[in-house]
Image (cartoon, coloured by chain):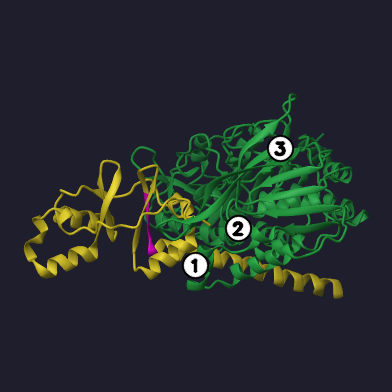
């Protein structure tokens, strides 16, 4: 076939590799495959055998309704020009150069895989962990299933008031009975059944109006079967600056959030076995430990709010110190992406260097031919699952514009068969979508027997064995 | 959401000029990069901002203005943001004070510029994402109920 024939026809479809099978990968595939002209073929890669990324490993097990979005992803996967290659890792099994040999366009959506550190003394004491490690652990992520958390400690601090922090606090406060009907990993269910955690502190550096958690989540914290919730009245109260800002720009969601939190300040304890304390206007300055190197307390400094020139209310330390005795600390103060081998990275923002999803050359800051990005590795960790849909659409629009201007990679062998040969050779144990559907079916069947949505496989070798590939 | 996420997908370059460069050169840069404002920089930090409106206003007064230095017409009192500033607060402030461009500085270094268009787009995408997620969940619930009933 002549190399100068147009790409995007039945004879010569545009071939796109998507790296990362989280929500953004599926949204991108969906946008690309909707077109009948140009004709586009999509191969979706993930380093894990299972698709869905953070929907499987991030969204909390007691939030199954949010996980229902996978039904839409499964529909995308039925498209005849879609293929899935699970358990194939970029940088290990295949390289960017390999992809350039077989695809016209490469699309990176690998998410924000690491957490930001608090940058305070004592952060690495035993008993201090990134919240994401705990989340990945209870969700059965194969890389984190063997983590150990000492749940004999009675008091736990969760630093941050975003939705991840709220998830961690809520899972720690749930009763074993509540968790038993979810798809939480079996080993986590057992460990949490034995948990002696009695008090959980959620720590926000700003006030109630500035907390990132959403209203349904904060309301849910007040409805736990075996945990009371409380907030200090003086911390739930609005400061003058926030009051003025809300008066000038009324915002019902924020007012409602404050109202819910203030109602917790006046709620009596009902004798439930756990207590969840939501704190505001405090920042950790140090983790204190004992001789064995274990966390014994978190030192907090009290903050007040000050306005920046843009009207943002920022936390400013007052100097007033308080030690909160805790045996476990989970930090959830932000996330950032991990550089991919061979892909330019923007260290300022922890994302792939890009402009509206077109990957840029590190030197010239001009777009690289045929390389794109979307999701958290493009814009940083913000928004809900659905936010990735318009974000992926923006990138796909650029991809189609570039195709129309004949800007794409010139692969030497752009056939689906060549990719399959390469993958078979590099990772004989790759997992196809059919394979995944079999795993999915086994997981859900195992769940039915015990009244749970599914019982997850948490080891890659167990998944492969279940597929008869022992 | 803070404004770091707006800057993350805007590439690494902020187009800047020095205060002593000519207004004509500023005009050239605005046209070349298809943008509405330039940050005026001395050393690492911003000292002003010059927008297409500033130039139009100056031209309407004096046609020979193009050879003058940018310092003659730039806005010196510039509101400056930080990457940690809240998207909502920035949106409100820009709307109320009719600011169309906000230079963003971190550690004394200019790290980006946010336009009111960027802010509107980020807010739109955020709402669109939330609405889409909620709609899907509602529809899925209905389908699941129908499925159970049949």
SS for dot 3: strand
Q: Nearer the viewer, mark 3 or mark 2?
A: 3
Which numbered mark, 1 or 2, is in the foreground of this view?
Answer: 1
Q: In this orientation, which residue lies closer to the viewer: A455 or A25?
A: A455
Chain appearing in yellow on the rendered image: B
List the residue tagged with mark 3: A297
Residue A161 visible in the displayed image:
yes
Main secondary structure of the magenta stretch = strand
Give whichever of discs 1 and 3 has the lower sequence position: 1
Instruction: Please name the residue that numbered disc 1 is placed on.
Output: A245
Q: Quadrant of the C terminus of chain A?
A: top right
Circle 2 Cα neighbour tier, 10 Å, few/some/many (<14 / 14–19 / ≥20): some
Q: Nearer the viewer, residue A128 or B66?
A: A128
**Is B115 contained in the magenta span?**
yes
Chain letter, disc 1 residue: A
Label 1 close to label 3 by CB (< 8 Å): no
Circle 2 residue: A211
Query: What residue range appears in magenta?
Result: B112-116
> Is residue A456 part of the magenta span, yes or no?
no
């Amino acid at each position: 076939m002549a190399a100068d024939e147009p790409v995007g026809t039945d004879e010569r479809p545009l071939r796109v590799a998507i790296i990362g099978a989280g929500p953004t990968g599926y949204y991108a595939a969906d946008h690309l495959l909707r077109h009948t002209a140009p004709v586009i073929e999509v191969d979706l890669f993930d380093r894990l055998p299972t698709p869905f990324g953070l929907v499987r490993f991030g969204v909390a097990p007691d939030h199954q309704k949010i996980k229902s979005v996978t039904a839409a992803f499964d529909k995308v996967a039925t498209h005849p020009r879609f293929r899935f290659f699970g358990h194939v890792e970029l940088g290990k099994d295949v390289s960017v150069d390999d992809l350039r040999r077989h695809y016209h366009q490469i699309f990176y959506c690998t998410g924000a895989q690491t957490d930001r550190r608090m940058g305070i003394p004592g952060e690495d004491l035993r008993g201090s962990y990134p919240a994401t490690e705990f989340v990945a652990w209870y969700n059965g992520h194969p890389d984190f299933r063997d983590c150990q958390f000492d749940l004999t400690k009675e008091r736990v601090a969760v630093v941050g008031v975003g939705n991840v922090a709220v998830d961690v606090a809520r899972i720690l406060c749930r009763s074993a009975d509540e968790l038993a009907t979810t798809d939480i990993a079996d080993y986590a269910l057992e460990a949490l059944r034995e948990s002696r955690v009695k008090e959980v502190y959620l720590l926000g550096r700003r006030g109630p109006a500035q907390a990132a958690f959403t209203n349904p989540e904060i309301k849910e914290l007040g409805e736990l079967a075996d945990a009371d919730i409380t907030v200090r009245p003086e911390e739930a109260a609005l400061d003058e600056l926030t009051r003025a800002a809300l008066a000038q720009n009324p915002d019902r969601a924020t007012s409602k959030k404050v109202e819910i939190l203030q109602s917790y300040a006046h709620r009596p304890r009902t004798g439930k076995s756990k207590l969840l304390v939501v704190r505001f206007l405090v920042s950790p300055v140090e983790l204190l430990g004992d001789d064995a190197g274990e966390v014994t307390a978190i030192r907090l400094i009290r903050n007040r709010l000050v306005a920046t020139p843009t009207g943002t209310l920022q936390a400013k330390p007052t100097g007033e110190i308080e030690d909160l005795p805790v045996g476990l600390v989970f930090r959830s103060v932000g996330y950032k992406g991990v550089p991919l081998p061979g892909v330019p990275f923007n260290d300022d923002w922890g994302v792939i260097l890009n402009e509206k999803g077109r990957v840029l050359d590190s030197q010239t800051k001009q777009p690289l031919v045929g390389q794109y990005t979307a999701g958290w590795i493009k814009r940083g960790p913000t928004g809900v699952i659905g936010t990735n849909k318009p974000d992926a659409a923006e990138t796909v629009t650029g991809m189609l514009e570039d195709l129309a201007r004949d800007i794409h990679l010139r692969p030497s062998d752009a056939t689906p068969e060549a990719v399959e040969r390469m993958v078979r050779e590099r990772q004989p144990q790759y997992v196809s979508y059919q394979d995944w559907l079999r795993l999915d079916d086994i997981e859900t069947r195992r769940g039915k027997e015990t009244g749970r949505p599914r019982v997850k496989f948490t080891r890659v070798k167990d998944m492969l064995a279940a597929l008869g590939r022992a | 959401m803070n404004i770091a996420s707006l800057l993350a997908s805007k590439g690494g370059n902020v187009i800047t000029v020095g205060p002593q460069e000519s207004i004509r050169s500023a005009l050239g840069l605005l046209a070349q990069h298809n943008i509405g404002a330039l940050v005026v920089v001395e050393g690492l930090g911003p000292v002003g901002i010059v927008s297409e409106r500033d130039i139009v206003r100056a031209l309407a007064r004096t046609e020979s203005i193009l050879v003058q230095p940018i310092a003659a017409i730039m806005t010196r009192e510039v509101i400056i943001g930080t990457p940690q500033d809240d998207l909502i607060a920035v949106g409100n402030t820009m709307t109320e004070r009719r600011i169309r461009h906000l230079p963003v500085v971190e550690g004394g270094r200019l790290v980006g510029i946010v336009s009111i268009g960027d802010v509107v787009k980020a807010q739109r995408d955020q709402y669109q994402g939330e609405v889409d997620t909620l709609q899907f969940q509602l529809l899925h619930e209905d389908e699941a109920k129908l499925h159970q009933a049949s």
